[in-house]
Image (cartoon, helix red, strand yellow):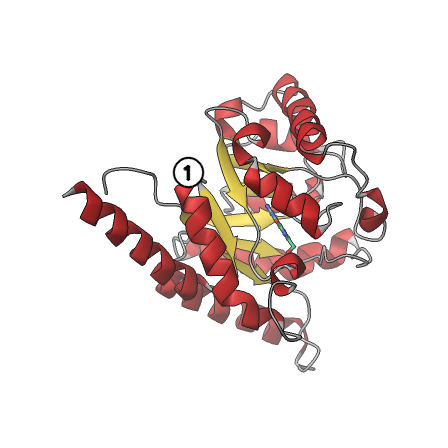
Amino acid sequence: MSGPHRPQLWGVVNTTPDSFSDGGLFEDVEKALEHARSLVADGAEVIDVGGESTRPGAGRVSADEEAARVIPVVEALASEGIVVSIDTMRASTARAALEAGAQIVNDVSGGLADEEMFAVVASARGDYVMMHWRGHSDTMDSLAQYDDVVAEVSREIRQRLEAATAAGIDSSRILVDPGLGFAKTPDHNWAILAHLGDVVPEGMRSVIGASRKRFLGELLADAHEPAQRDGVSAALGVLLAERGVFALRVHNVRAHREALDVWQAFHEGGAS
Ligand code: PMM
């Protein structure tokens, strides 16, 4: 397509145990694989595999448990030729996932949760998603304090970028994510979205994870389940495409693909 870049769709696969299943790890792995394959069929270019919930208030999972959940999934998907991103704040999990074939490390802490992370990424190949973060899920809501959220998040992102490049990660490998909902209220999220061009350094690729988040649910009239936020998520996805975002991290890939099809046809109509 001529004109703006069409964002990649990264499909989210959580390997956190299914509370409705008592089939153990094997069944959970099989379910995650099935889900990932359906997201690829729907148009996902990357599958983002995570084993630790980062929802507000969530506690941590041990390193062993996280690795036991994610590594078999990463290995199986990579062997099928699927591009895998590992969503982890732990250097040990990132290293194991890279060895198992992951091509991207998605670190919601931007290297702050584990001081070994930058070294692991620097010594490997592939992209690194560096998200803006202020603290773990059990404290992050209390860290949502800013005088000027756009200026402060922009500054903190640049500080982390300097640290990452000083540790040997080439900036061309880094994708910047402002971390919607991570130490941010809905108003903070909207301010950041309105000023993405200031928050993401010029010339750098960005990833946005807005899909199904609470701040979108708040726009809807009645109490909605996360899956009922797919329409508003896709609407925002189109606006982000317009802003030149490189990738959208989403749960319902099909809804976003269709929305981007409309966006693309709209632009191509204008171009002919
Ligand atoms: N959000 C969540 C988890 N991982 N990774 C990136 N890069 N950006 C995000 O915004 C992000 C993430 C939490 O959302 P979920 O619980 O809906 O997956």
Question: Ligand 1: does it lie within 8 Å of the C-beta at label 1?
Answer: no
Instruction: Work out which residue is located at the far left of the displayed protein and give it.
Output: 272
Q: Quadrant of residue 245?
A: top left
Report the number of discs: 1
Front position in the image: 176 or 79: 176
Image quadrant containing the N terminus? top left
Residue 46 can be seen in this image:
no
Residue 53 can be seen in this image:
yes
Residue at the spot x=32%, y=52% of the render?
263
| Image side of residue 84 versus residue 147, left or right | left
Residue at the spot x=57%, y=35% of the render?
195
Residue 67 lies, with reference to residue 130, above or below; the image says below
Image quadrant containing the C terminus? top left
- Please state which amino acid type lies under the numbered disc 1: Gly
x then y, percent, for residue 211:
55, 58
x then y, percent, for residue 176:
56, 34
Residue 254 lies, with reference to residue 166, above or below; the image says below
Q: Quadrant of residue 144?
A: top right
| Image side of residue 272 versus residue 221, left or right | left
Front position in the image: 50 or 65: 50
* Structural crowding at the residue carrying mark 1, measured as other residues with C-alpha within 10 Å and reported as few (<14), some (14–19) or many (≥20): some
Front position in the image: 258 or 150: 150
Residue at the spot x=40%, y=65% of the render?
254
x then y, percent, for residue 70:
62, 57
| Image side of residue 61 versus residue 18, left or right | right
Residue 156 lies, with reference to residue 46, above or below; the image says above
Q: Element type at marker 1?
A: loop
Residue 189 lies, with reference to residue 15, above or below; the image says above
Q: Which residue lies under the disc numbered 1?
A: 244
